[in-house]
Structures are given as structure tokens and as C-alpha cells.
Amino acid sequence: MRTEDYLRILKDEIHSAVFATTDGEGLPVTRVIDIMLVDRDSLYFITAKGKEFYRQLMDTGYVAVSGMTGGAGSMEKKAVSVRGKVRNTGGRLLSQVFEENPYMAEIYPDEDSRTALEVFQLYEGRGEFFDLSTKPITRDSFLLGKTDKEEVPGAAGGYLITERCRGCRLCYSKCPQKCINIEASPCVILQEHCLHCGNCYEICPFEAVVKRRV
């Protein structure tokens, strides 16, 4: 899938997500915010100028967002996380926000009350998609905006098997998703299904498994 597809899952299937910033002392702060708009490679949300959230966004210019779809059970859910740079776009998109999210008119019913609101855009960063409904699970990473691909080495984090591999297959025996190609030499972790649990890293007697650079 493309970046836009993942962002639309975040907006349409999740919509209310957890947003993380830091306060003036560098401590983490979270709150639930609605995703109002998305385009090809960015997302938009609103907040009021009087809120601490607004001040933190203006001070740091950075935010992290995570959300998960609903469903009858955990194994039917999808999760999307993004983090990156944000900028204040003012009020120019407010009419579109209220058009696409008509429930907002019940919270801010008239133009005078909406003067407190401004629209922020998460325009550059990286994201990760995680789907528990597939067998094996599916994981993917994606870029937002002009982020350098070198900053996102495939999936964020995880593990690689190096040339030190001797083909003992102990990694496969401990892998909960069996997402290691043991026919290859060296063995290859199928990153799109990897849980990043570290079992392969812990059990390899030849230290052939290394952590990926995040």
C-alpha cells in the first residue's frame, strides 16, 4: 500500500488517535485527538490556541501519533503510528475540516467560536503499519513528505541476519511467526511479518543476528 492508504486508515477507520508531545520539562504528554484530513503524504488535525497542546506543538514542531482500529478481538485489529514534523497552517483549512467532519459543528457551532481553532499539518516523518488480522502478521513502514529514505531503513528497527549465519536454524525454531527463510544462505528475516521480538537475536550462537538501525 501507499502512504496515503495508511493515512486513510488512520483517518477513516481509526480517526481518534493518541498524540504525544513533550512539556516544558521534556516529559511526555499524551491526549486523544481526531484526524481531520489527510492527503497524499500528510495528515491534519486541529487544536485551540489556548491549550497546552497548542503551545507544545509550537515550541517543538514535532508530534507522534498512534491509533488502532476497533474489532471484536485483538487479532482483527490494525494499527498505524506516525511521527514527524508539524507546522501550523492557521485557519485556511477550517472550512474543509468542518465539511468533512460535520460533528465538529456541535462542539464549535458558529464562526465566532471557531476563531480559537487552528489547523496543524504533520508534513514530514515516518510511519509504521501493523496488521494482526493476517496470517502471518503484516508490518510495513512508510514515509511522509520529503523525509530521506535513509532515515527509514525498511521497517523501523527490527533485526537482520548477517554473513556469520551458519544455517543452524535455531532462529527459526524460536520465531513466533516463522518469518525466517531458512532456505537462503544466510537465512533471511521476512521483515513484513517480523514482530521485532528479538528471539532470533537472543538465541543465535554465532552472533549472526544484528539489530537494525532505527
Image (spheres, rainbow, N blue to C red):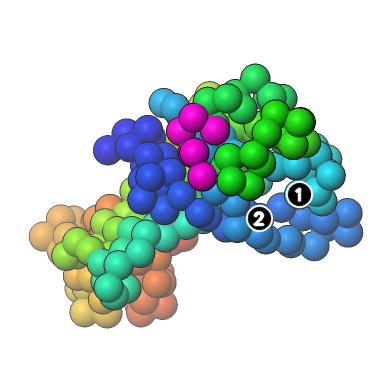
Q: Is residue 20 above or below residue 85?
A: below
Inspect the image, locate mark 2, and give the three-letter code of the amino acid beneath it: Ala
Horizontally, is 11 left or right of 58 in the view? left
Front of the two marks 1 and 2:
1
Determine the residue positioned at 41% across, 40% down. 7
**Which residue is label 2 attached to?**
20
In this picture, which residue range is highlighted in magenta? 98-103
Q: Quadrant of residue 60?
A: top right
Q: Circle 2: is it few (<14), some (14-19), or many (20+) Cα within 10 Å?
A: many
Q: 132 above or below 44?
A: below
Q: Position of residue 53 (x, y in %)?
A: 76, 49
Q: Quadrant of the N terminus?
A: top left
Measure the C-alpha gap from mark 1 to mark 2: 9 Å
Q: Residue furthest right?
A: 25
Q: Is residue 143 magenta?
A: no
Q: What residue is pinned by disc 1? A: 53
In-front residue for pair 71/170: 71
Residue type for callout 1: Phe
